[in-house]
Amino acid sequence: MKIIAAVLVSTLVGGAAVAQTSDPSTSPRASAATANTATTMAKGDAKRDDAVEKHIDQLHDSLKITPAQEAQWNEVAATMRDNAKAMDRAIDKRIAGAATATAVDDLKAYEDIAQTHANGVAKLATAFSGLYSTMSDDQKKAADAAFSHRGHDAKKVASR
């Protein structure tokens, strides 16, 4: 989850930079700019796919998923992949329209990304709850730590 959040934040920041550039359609190099944007988005999608796969593998290892839990784990992993694809679509849509987006368009694009993220978290919680109920106490402890932001939250609370 932390990787996905980090990818989302970095993509949003990068998208904001794209949104602040001039309209490429007014440039004689408009088609090249459009091709570059498409290529950049495809490369970004591939990087995010790789990051999601790495995160899935790391989580599988840290949770010590047993052979008996593989079917439920596969549902969790598929949900994570589906969520990543949905985020890719929402982010790519925002990036594609960034050159001509108004402030309102930009806010609506952020809303769409945030809603996509919220829907994905709900789907993941549903998929993960079945697996969690089959876990040993040690696995549950590892899962609690993996999905916790306690260390991060503690730093926020301490700095207030």
Image (cartoon, helix red, strand yellow):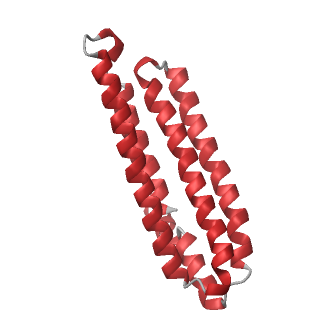
Q: Vertically, is 56 above or below 50?
A: below
Q: Is residue 6 left or right of residue 132?
A: left
User: Which of these two is toward me, 122 or 57?
Assistant: 57
Q: Vertically, is 102 above or below 159?
A: above
Question: Which residue is pictured at 25% across the width and 16% down the height?
Answer: 29
Residue 51 in view in this figure: yes
The location of residue 30, given as percent across then percent down, is 31, 16
Question: Which residue is pictured at 64% across the width and 56% down the height?
Answer: 121
The location of residue 54, given as percent across then percent down, is 43, 66
The location of residue 129, given as percent across then percent down, is 72, 71
Q: Vertically, is 121 above or below 150?
A: above
User: Which of these two is toward me, 147 or 155?
Assistant: 147
Question: Which residue is pictured at 62% across the width and 86% down the height?
Answer: 67
Q: Number of marks in the image?
A: 0
Residue 155 in view in this figure: no
The location of residue 136, given as percent across then percent down, is 66, 90
Question: Which residue is pictured at 34% across the width and 36% down the height?
Answer: 39
User: Which of these two is toward me, 156 or 108?
Assistant: 108
Q: Vertically, is 98 above or below 92?
A: above
